[in-house]
Image: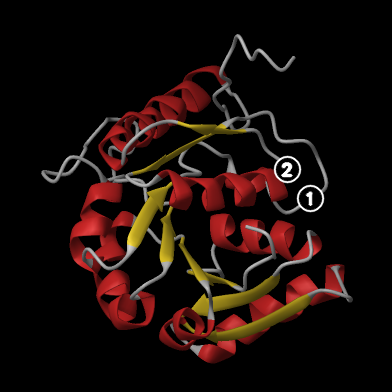
Amino acid sequence: MSEKKTLAVIGGTGDLGGGLAWRWAKAGYRVIVGSRTQDKAETAAAGILADHPDAIVEGLANVDAAAAAELIVVTVPFSVQKVNLDAIREAAAGKVVLDCTVPLVPPKVARVQLPEGGSAGQLAQEILGDNVDVVSAFHNVGAEHLRSDQQIDCDVMVFGNKVAARDQAVELVEAAGMKAWHAGPLANSAAAEAMTSVLIGINRRYGVHGAGVRITGDPTK
């Protein structure tokens, strides 16, 4: 992206959405925090502004946030992915949508339970339709690490059927302070989504505080 796009973070009052919004606001993006209700969104936006007074942040209801943005980021639980995507479908037409949904099915969230459609990323594309470019990322990032200046020990794999759309997501990953990797088409998102359950199990077994994924053999290092 030659210029920073206006971002809507759907579900931006949650840990992942709020943390990403915090980092992107700090990086100079105009961020619209989305929530089911505008008052919750405004409260979350005010919290970001308290930490970054010079940032451009506002809070709107999800549908209004999606309509006002140039690029939409979806950070909602799998159980409400469809209802949220249905609500913003019209506003998302012609845009890139970065979907971060992981198909966790409580109570056994440490067990891989991919949906019949193959992955949450593919389901997002099916719901939003062909006039939306869906990319998928941030599946394996410990959300508790985002809302701070600390270095996050995790790489981010970016999936999508169009390279240009993935490029936009890669830029957002890097703006949030992480290493991004083009990881192929949206169908490949199933691998990272499944890994989230594996990492949850590792966290529990070994007492790890937010296990992540690193891609080794980086030729740039």
Q: Nearer the viewer, residue 1 or 104?
A: 1
Q: Earlier in the sequence, mark 1 or mark 2?
A: 1
Q: Of helix, strand and loop, which one carries label 2?
A: loop
Q: Nearer the viewer, residue 199 or 57?
A: 57
Assess disc 2: are there few (<14), some (14-19) or many (≥20) residues with their C-alpha within 10 Å of its C-alpha. some
Q: Residue furthest left?
A: 116
> Which disc number belongs to residue 199?
none
Assess disc 1: are there few (<14), some (14-19) or many (≥20) residues with their C-alpha within 10 Å of its C-alpha. few
Please identify the quarter of the rendering in which residue 32 is found. bottom right
Q: Amino acid at mark 1?
A: Ser
Q: Amino acid at mark 2?
A: Gly
Q: Which residue is mark 1?
A: 148
Q: Nearer the viewer, residue 179 or 46?
A: 179
Coordinates of residue 52 in the picture (x, y in percent): 85, 69
Coordinates of residue 135 in the picture (x, y in percent): 40, 50
Q: Residue furthest top?
A: 217
Q: Nearer the viewer, residue 92 or 137?
A: 92
Rendered view: 17 above or below 167: below
The quadrant of the image that shows the C terminus is: top right
* Number of marks present in the image shown: 2
Coordinates of residue 128 in the picture (x, y in percent): 25, 67
Rendered view: 101 above or below 195: below
Q: Are marks 1 and 2 in contact (CB under 8 Å)?
A: no
Query: Which residue is at a point 80% across and 62% down the rendered structure image?
Result: 26
> Which disc number belongs to residue 177?
2
The figure's colour scheme reads secondary structure
Query: Which residue is at a point 55% across and 69% down the rendered structure image?
Result: 12
Rendered view: 78 above or below 208: below
Instruction: Give left or right: position of 96 versus 126.
Output: right
Q: Of helix, strand and loop, which one carries label 1?
A: loop
